[in-house]
């Protein structure tokens, strides 16, 4: 596993980075009025637009408490004192910046692209989606990082918010290649041990693993540390049902071998098993305290991103 770090001197010496092929700035202007908002109180490094866990300071008014001798008299509510004869201190809800980490599944199953010629894979869809989202997060003066998961934790860039940092994220995202093995749970555990400041974790994965309990055991640790965890379940439409053909050869993308079968003979069983997987995944996510979204690659990524942002701010 590699953790990337860059000194200011090194970055300053480099020429301006090339824009990622997954970033369409013109298309993103249609979403410029939207922001990535947190649903829970967060911790951050500096003042921003999101609710902090710490009270005090000069943010939005939150509540009152009885005045304690020695407190700053500037925070005393003199109008309440004059009206009731009792001294109360105003409590304000500090605002802070958002720390977000995008955990991207790069296992072999994410390379599935269906039967249509020139169709994009699930990973390519995630590359477009995560590039656009990371750009929007930094544009709104928040911080974002990226972790690549496959056979464990492959690479990680911790959250930051500079334009040079964003360019490095986009370079990493654009260069992701899938690996045959899947150890999503181990990768999330490793990531948990490396991220010390809580924030928002977005997991972008198809969750095609042998045991769903393993990744969610790791996500429970994030939730126990009061992270906000969002599961983006990536589904290709041709995974939902088998193609209509007399005979097909199915080849596993994670060293699973080949199977020759008639889709008509196994279609009903396959669809039942797939629906069971989706149901189990959603129930595990909600039971763990995660937010769950099923994302179809049949829907344009900008439409998916816009709906996601609107739902969170609504």
Image (cartoon, rainbow, N blue to C red):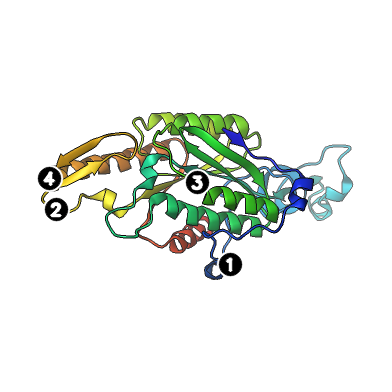
Residue shown at the point (63%, 38%) measured from the top left:
198
Residue bearing the label numbered 2? 245
Q: Which mark is residue 310?
A: none
Residues under numbered marks 1 and 4 in contact, where contact means CB atoms less than 8 Å apart: no
Asked whether residue 277 is in view, the answer is: yes
**Of callouts 1 and 3, which one flags the residue occurring earlier in the amino acid sequence?**
1
Residue 32 marker: 1
Is residue 312 positioned above or below 267 on the image?
Answer: below
Point out which mark residue 176 bears. Answer: 3
- The vertical placement of 88 against 17, above or below, is above
Judge depth for marks 2 and 1 and give the one in front. Answer: 2
Give whichever of discs 3 and 4 has the lower sequence position.
3
Asked whether, in this view, residue 104 is left or right of residue 277, the answer is: right
The residue located at (45%, 35%) in the rendering is 288
Distance CA(mark 3)–CA(mark 4)? 34 Å
Name the mark nearer the viewer: 1 or 4: 4
Measure how far apart labels 4 and 2 are at the Cα level: 7 Å
Q: Residues within 10 Å of mark 4 (few under 14, many from 20)?
A: some
Nearer-N-terminus badge (4/2) = 2
Whether label 2 touches label 3, CB < 8 Å: no
Residue position marked by numbered label 4 in the rendering: 262
* Element class at badge 3: loop
Residue 89 in the image: state x and y as whole percent.
79, 46
């Amino acid at each position: 596993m590699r953790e990337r770090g860059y000194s200011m001197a090194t970055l300053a010496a480099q020429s301006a980075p090339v824009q990622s092929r997954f970033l369409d700035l013109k298309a993103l202007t249609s979403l410029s009025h939207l922001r990535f908002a947190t649903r829970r109180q967060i911790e951050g490094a500096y003042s921003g637009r999101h609710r902090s866990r710490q009270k005090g300071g000069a943010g939005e008014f939150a509540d009152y408490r009885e005045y304690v001798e020695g407190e700053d008299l500037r925070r005393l509510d003199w109008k309440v004192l004059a009206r009731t004869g009792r001294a109360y201190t105003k409590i304000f809800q500090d605002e802070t910046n958002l720390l977000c980490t995008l955990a991207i599944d790069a296992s072999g199953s994410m390379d599935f692209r269906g039967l249509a010629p020139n169709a994009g894979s699930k990973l390519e869809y995630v590359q477009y989606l995560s590039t656009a989202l990371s750009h929007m997060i930094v544009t709104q003066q928040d911080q974002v990082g990226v972790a690549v998961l496959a056979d464990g934790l492959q690479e990680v860039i911790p959250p930051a918010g500079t334009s040079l940092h964003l360019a490095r994220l986009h370079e990493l995202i654009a260069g992701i290649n899938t690996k045959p093995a899947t150890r999503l749970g181990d990768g999330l555990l490793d990531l948990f041990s490396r991220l010390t400041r809580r924030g928002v974790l977005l997991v972008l994965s198809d969750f095609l693993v042998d045991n769903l309990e393993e990744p969610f055991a790791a996500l429970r640790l994030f939730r126990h540390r009061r992270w906000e965890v969002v599961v983006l379940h990536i589904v290709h439409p041709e995974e939902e049902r088998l193609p209509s053909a007399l005979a097909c050869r199915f080849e596993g993308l994670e060293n699973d071998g080949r199977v020759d079968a008639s889709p008509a003979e196994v279609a009903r069983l396959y669809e039942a098993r797939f629906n069971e997987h989706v149901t189990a995944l959603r129930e595990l996510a909600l039971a763990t305290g995660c937010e769950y979204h099923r994302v179809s690659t049949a829907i344009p990524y900008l439409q998916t991103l816009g709906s996601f942002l609107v739902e969170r701010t609504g």
